[in-house]
Image (spheres, grey):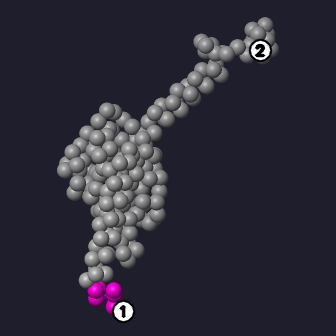
Amino acid sequence: EDDPAGRVVSWNAGAERIQSLKASEARLQAFMTFTPSMMFIKSRDGRYQYVNEPFCRSFGLERDAVLGRTDAEIFPSDQAGRFQANDASVIVAGTAREFEETAQYRDGWHTSIVCKFPIRDAEGAVSALGGVVMDITERKRTEHELLDKQACMEAADCPGRAWNPSDSAKLRTPPDRM
């Protein structure tokens, strides 16, 4: 139990809090370990405190090469600058934000939706930054292919373009009357 000043006055209550904290930490660890999405936690000054396996695998990095380092120490300067600017905007705003970020992974460039959010301490101050990354590279590639096909289909000379009844009228109409 606590006294009015918030100090623990019972060892039993303290042990229960420790057990509760350990259980909470185990749940968080399981979540971070088994999600297929990249996840990270950075200190306020941008140093990685935690990265999960998908993060390490995607960037081709060992966890020890990431923890305690900043984006500028890990990634090319332009990429690090974009990451850091987005991080700063979340810390200043104090609210979660989503960004579309491009990054060089070990197998090439990828586009991702990154949800970045402030992590607050017991007093409510922003003490760290969390992030969850969803790779949308294939979706973006498909969108571009569809837009290219749509543009092609709208052009009269596109091979494989579906026939439109107005096409035959266009062929019989002199250009000066179209």
Q: Quadrant of the C terminus?
A: top right
Find the magenta span and give its range: 1-10
Element assignment for label 2: helix
Q: Residue furthest front?
A: 12
129, 79: nearer the viewer: 129
The magenta stretch spans residue 5? yes
Which element is circle 1 on? Answer: loop
Q: Could you say which is closer to the camera, residue 157 or residue 35? A: 35
Q: As drawn, is 173 to the left or to the right of 30?
A: right
| Disc 2 from disc 1: Cα separation | 84 Å
- In this picture, residue 172 sits left or right of residue 146: right
Identify which amino acid the numbered label 2 is placed on.
Pro
Circle 2 residues within 10 Å: few <14, some 14–19, many ≥20 = few
Q: Residue at x 63, y 20 (%)?
A: 153
Please state which of residues 88 and 94 is positioned toward the viewer in this rendering.
Answer: 94
Of the pair 162 and 9, the residue shown nearer to us: 9
Q: Is residue 85 visible?
A: no
Q: Quadrant of residue 19?
A: bottom left
Q: Which residue is mark 1?
A: 4
- Mark closer to the observer (2, 1): 1
Residue name at image x 46 percent, y 33 percent: 138
Residue 93 picture location, percent across and down? 45, 64
Question: Is residue 96 found left or right of 163 in the rendered image?
Answer: left
**Is the stretch drawn in magenta largely helix, strand or loop?**
loop
Q: Quadrant of residue 88?
A: bottom left
**Residue 160 image point, x, y percent:** 61, 13
- Which residue position is annotated with label 2? 165
